[in-house]
Amino acid sequence: MSNRPPGDDAGKRQRTSTKLTAHRGLATWGERLVPLGEFRDAAAAAGQELSAAARATAAAAHRQPVDDATPIEGPFGRIVAFGGVYNNHFALEALLAEAAGCRAEAIYCLGDLGGFGPNPEKVRPLLEEGGVLGVQGNYEESLATGREDCNCGYTDPRDNEFADLSYRYTADRCSPETRRWLGSWPLRRRVRVGGQELLLVHGSPRRINEFLFASTSPVPFLDVLFDEQRCDGFLCTHTGLPWHRRLPSGRDAVNVGVIGRPPNDGATDVRYALIEAGADGLEVQLRSLAYDHQALAAEMRAEQLPEEFVETILTGWWTTCLEILPAKERAASRF
């Protein structure tokens, strides 16, 4: 029988909801929260005005393809790609079993092995035993170079507080050997699946910690990225929210999701991508993955990680790292 007073759970939920929605009507400006109207006025007054000719010159320069000597791997008929392990060795074990079951010819991790979950040294042996090929995320780059923070790209003080706590936990438990191993991962890979050449990155082709959300990645913007990078598609992660868009040009932008925590949808499963060569281009499946989330939650509590993190694992709803979400993705949240 519970010793908590009647209504205590309801009161806790109300306090949590109030705390998480206190930002509404405000915008993040550096480390400050300011009224949204003030932020809009400042944004409207910023920037510079160019002539039509200058705009055309700048646009042409922006679309110039980048030089990239990254070797092409493959060709493969079927690959598995995932991101954001976040120390969740339970989900990683489940994913490797699924990848073997679907006869994936190669398995790619798009970075961010650490943060959020417990016991980071349990992840590396699984990746090595599974023959997983990786690209560095901001976590790997920070750990390998001795940064003091995860370079996650957050701007909100509350998000950064939890990000700093996660990074310090992982950094304090990450061996020098593992740091060197993470630093040996490349920042990008090129992989041929069927007749399509794919660029594999962590955040975006432009920046390791850029957030590419479905609602803020329009077709013209993606077309520019494809033109710059000379690829038929790219796979990324970092946001924690999976999505796939087939462009009118036939090229594919895929955020493969993360396996470290659920995609803020009220279910405890996590996500990964199965990419196959099809008759009419790529066939992309964003798959749901069940794992022992109860065991993960218990291990997180044993390691005294924040209860906010545990709640996300048990409920499927994010309680942290929410302020970076665009309006459409935030509207789909519980908080």
Image: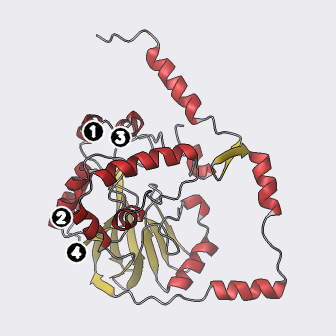
The amino acid type, in three-letter code, at marker 2 is: Ala
Badge 1 element: loop
- Check disc 1 and report the residue beneath it: 303
50 on left or right of 109: right
Badge 2 element: helix
Coordinates of residue 289 in the picture (x, y in percent): 30, 52
Quarter location, residue 311:
top left
- Check disc 2 and report the residue beneath it: 100
The amino acid type, in three-letter code, at marker 3 is: Ile
Disc 3 crowd rating (10 Å Cα; few below 14, some 14-19, many 20+) is many
- Check disc 3 and report the residue beneath it: 313
Q: Earlier in the sequence, mark 3 or mark 1?
A: 1
Residue closest to the far left: 129
Badge 4 element: loop
Indicate whether 83 appears above or below 297: below
Query: Do the numbered discs 3 and 2 sit on residues whose CB atoms are within 8 Å?
Result: no
Q: Earlier in the sequence, mark 4 or mark 2?
A: 2
Coordinates of residue 81 in the picture (x, y in percent): 33, 67
Disc 1 crowd rating (10 Å Cα; few below 14, some 14-19, many 20+) is few
Badge 3 element: helix
Q: Earlier in the sequence, mark 2 or mark 1?
A: 2
